[in-house]
């Protein structure tokens, strides 16, 4: 009996020591993280970091600025920033290990770092083999305990295999909210499913070939995985979406969210992606949150940016009439647009428009036409926020001559011949597959997200780090052949809206040949 | 052109010899090509006419204000750049301090290569991170206008992440531009600055 008690006591104390140990580890890792992100006291004091003798601000000198969240490094121009994730740094760099890892030149070999050599590298800029680190690498004034914490954090970077990927397949989900009409959900799913089907058909034998030799298994064919698409159709009110997403994710972990459609508040999905560390790639949404975080990448800031640009152009205007959908999601759009206008000192009112009024719409094109027809006195101008429309702004010419004369599209999408040229690639793809989407905006945007993902996964090879996936997209999006009507799509580190320029395009001016009369404005 | 070539050669030699960092980076152990610093006279560069916007949102016509007789230094950045831009701007800020300490006044101009994102406000916030003194303009504006400037100085590489680390300098309005490409130290930039060719 005594023995049992003693054994139990030992068991308890071992457990509590373990708990204390892991709490201490967590504290060490957290401190390391704050050094990596440049927020720790040792990084923010003046002179904490110098590049070639010149003081550098903490935000620029932080490890994360160049080596990035993944710890797998980056490339800018000819400058290769090497990986510092623990599995790379604390192992020797040999030609065969460097070969398939990002940003590592094949002929750079070095011994493994330890905490002593890491301290020397950070403070004196010397690698374990005596090689001087590249000129842009800052020199710090860190202590041995700082480096111990940093090393503990580096060991966590890109260390665990990502959920949603195994040796055979990569799983993606696409999210729609309940306000999206069925035809648009169909356009989204048809485009993505067709793309996935062909992607898988094109690689269906590759998985089998892996077994043919040791060499092929470790090199050529391992990157060919089957792609699987989940459709997460959210239901009910936005405040329940977070829990729905958690449940779907728990049941089927996915590697990333791909495309998606919503005209409602996207905040719950955005927040879910950030807290789950889940890339959320280019959903077609009109109300993303304004802030730029890490995991969510958007085409544009949506209605808020359109309303903001419009408000800036309406000099001397004190009130506008706002038309939104009569629904809960329409009410939320109204609230978002209303608050943007009031930031610019413009009041949003509700009344039957008079001849000198200005009407702003966040409606589908058919609904705009229907409401316009009921007016006894046409208003001065009808500004159409295109973020609420399913079709490409270019594809809509008002039937009503009065509306055509008074309509002005407010959009980040391109117009005219240039936009048509860009869409030709997508149209060819859709035609060959006998897909006839009602919304080319949705089909082209979804196709771009899918092609971009293919391209990016090829680049990241076997390194299925979600952070690295996002970082590669920062590079790749700008280099993609244009497939949507957006004039330029470009993001970057800490830049998450790809199209930032909003244009005002009078519908009367559109000749179809060019964007004549377009007023270019910046948010 | 021959003259420019003859002038540039001793300078390149000087940079490598004077800097142990650069020299040892090329001992064959390290292959990061961005560490090479090259210096060359570019007689053909001309500042094009362009409309840009300063950090207070005021329109500026170029070359206009850049066409003074003061020495001029130009670089290209974007504010969400991960590595090159902050490093290079910090180096130029240090050079500005060293020039001021020598009683030399030069004019600095920084162009964004990402004007869609880099509004005048964002450029101002970027500039505030560095201890920058007066005589330094940060310009944003229309994408096409900034593109013209980048092309005139051969720094446009198709996407912003591919932009090369380049500093351009000239002694005066009529003098040729000198292009420094790579990560030069403040001391190396100062050495180039002090040997800038005069107008011909």
Image: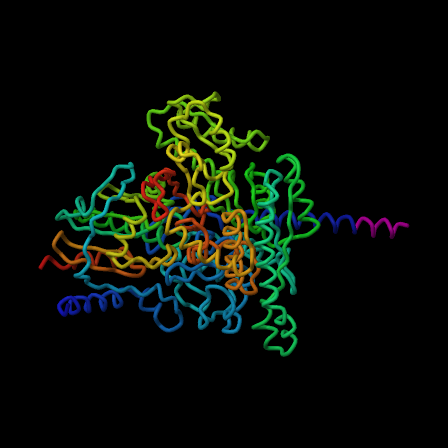
Q: Is residue B73 above or below residue A301?
A: below
Image position of B100 (left or right of A33): left
Q: Quadrant of residue B39?
A: bottom left
Q: Quadrant of residue A210?
A: bottom right
Q: Position of residue B55 (x, y in %)?
A: 29, 39
Q: Position of residue A336 (x, y in %)?
A: 50, 31
Q: What secondary structure characterizes most of the magenta part?
A: helix
Name the one closer to the observer, A235 or B155. Answer: A235
Q: Residue at image x 46%, y 39%?
A: A386
A214 is within the stretch colored magenta: no
A8 is within the stretch colored magenta: yes
Give, as a single range, the part of the protein colored magenta: A1-10
Q: Position of residue A209 (x, y in %)?
A: 63, 75
Q: Is residue A155 visible?
A: yes
Which residue, as the protein is rendered here, is positioned at the far left?
B200
Q: Residue at image x 62%, y 39%?
A: A178
Name the one closer to the observer, A519 or A511. Answer: A511
Q: Quadrant of the C terminus of chain A?
A: top left
Q: Is residue A237 above or below residue A48?
A: above
Image position of B81 (left or right of A243): left
Q: Position of residue B196 (x, y in %)?
A: 16, 58
Q: How many marks?
A: 0
């Amino acid at each position: 009996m005594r023995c049992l008690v003693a054994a139990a006591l030992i068991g308890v104390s071992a457990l509590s020591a373990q708990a204390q140990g892991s709490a201490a580890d967590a504290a060490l890792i957290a401190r390391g993280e704050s050094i990596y992100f440049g927020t720790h006291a040792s990084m923010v004091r003046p002179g904490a970091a110098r590049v070639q003798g010149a003081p550098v601000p903490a935000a620029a000198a932080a490890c994360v600025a160049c080596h990035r969240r993944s710890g797998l490094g980056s490339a800018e121009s000819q400058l290769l920033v090497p990986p510092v994730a623990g599995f790379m740094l604390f192992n020797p760099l040999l030609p065969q290990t460097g070969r398939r890892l990002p940003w590592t030149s094949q002929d750079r070999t070095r011994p493994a770092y330890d905490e002593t050599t890491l301290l020397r590298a950070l403070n004196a800029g010397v690698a374990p083999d005596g090689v001087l680190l590249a000129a842009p690498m800052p020199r710090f004034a860190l202590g041995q305990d700082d480096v111990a914490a940093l090393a503990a954090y580096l060991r966590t970077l890109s260390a665990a295999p990502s959920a949603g990927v195994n040796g055979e397949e990569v799983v993606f989900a696409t999210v729609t909210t309940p306000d999206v009409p069925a035809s648009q959900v169909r356009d989204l799913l048809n485009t993505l499913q067709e793309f996935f089907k062909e992607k898988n058909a094109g690689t269906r034998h590759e998985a089998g070939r892996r077994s043919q030799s040791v060499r092929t298994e470790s090199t050529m064919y391992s990157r060919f995985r089957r792609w699987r698409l989940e459709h997460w159709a959210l239901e009910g009110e936005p405040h329940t979406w977070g829990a729905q997403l958690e449940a779907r994710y728990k049941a089927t972990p996915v590697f990333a969210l791909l495309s998606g459609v919503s005209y409602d508040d996207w905040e719950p999905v955005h927040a879910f992606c950030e807290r789950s560390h889940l890339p959320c790639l280019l959903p077609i949404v009109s109300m993303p949150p304004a802030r730029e975080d890490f995991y969510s990448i958007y085409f544009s800031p949506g209605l808020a940016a359109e309303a903001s640009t419009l408000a800036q152009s309406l000099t001397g205007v004190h009130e506008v009439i706002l038309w939104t959908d009569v629904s809960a999601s329409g009410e939320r759009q109204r609230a978002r647009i209303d608050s943007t206008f009031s930031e610019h000192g413009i009041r949003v009112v509700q009344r039957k428009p008079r001849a000198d009024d200005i009407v702003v719409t966040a409606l589908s094109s058919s609904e705009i036409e229907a409401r316009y027809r009921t007016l006894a006195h046409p208003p001065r101008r009808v500004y159409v926020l295109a973020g609420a429309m399913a079709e490409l702004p270019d594809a809509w010419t008002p039937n009503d001559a009065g509306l055509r004369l008074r309509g002005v599209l407010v959009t980040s999408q391109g117009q005219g011949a240039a936009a048509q040229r860009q869409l030709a690639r997508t149209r060819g793809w859709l035609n060959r597959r006998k897909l006839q989407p009602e919304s080319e905006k949705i089909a082209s945007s979804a196709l771009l997200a899918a092609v971009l993902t293919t391209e990016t996964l090829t680049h990241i090879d076997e390194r299925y780090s979600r952070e690295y996936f996002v970082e590669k997209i920062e590079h790749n999006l700008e280099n993609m052949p244009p497939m949507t009507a957006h004039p330029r799509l470009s993001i970057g580190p800490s830049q998450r809206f790809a199209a930032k320029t909003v244009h005002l395009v009078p519908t009367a001016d559109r000749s179809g040949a060019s964007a004549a009369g377009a007023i270019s404005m910046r948010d | 052109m021959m003259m420019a070539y003859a002038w540039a050669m001793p300078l390149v030699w000087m940079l490598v010899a004077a800097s142990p960092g650069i020299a040892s980076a090329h001992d064959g152990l390290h292959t990061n090509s961005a560490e090479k610093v090259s210096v060359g006279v570019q007689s053909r560069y001309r500042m094009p006419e362009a409309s840009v916007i300063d950090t207070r949102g005021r329109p500026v016509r170029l070359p206009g204000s850049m066409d003074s007789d003061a020495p001029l230094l130009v670089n290209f950045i974007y504010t969400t750049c991960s590595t090159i831009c902050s490093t290079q701007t910090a180096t130029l800020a240090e050079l500005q301090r060293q020039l001021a300490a020598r009683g030399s006044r030069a004019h600095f101009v920084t162009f964004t290569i990402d004007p869609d994102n880099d509004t005048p406000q964002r450029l101002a916030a970027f500039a505030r991170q560095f201890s920058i003194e007066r005589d330094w303009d940060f310009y944003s504006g229309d994408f096409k206008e900034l593109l013209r400037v980048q092309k005139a100085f051969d720094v446009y590489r198709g996407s912003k992440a591919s932009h090369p680390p380049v500093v351009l300098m000239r002694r005066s309005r009529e003098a040729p531009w000198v292009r420094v490409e790579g990560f030069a130290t403040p001391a190396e930039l100062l050495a180039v600055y002090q040997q800038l060719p005069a107008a011909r």
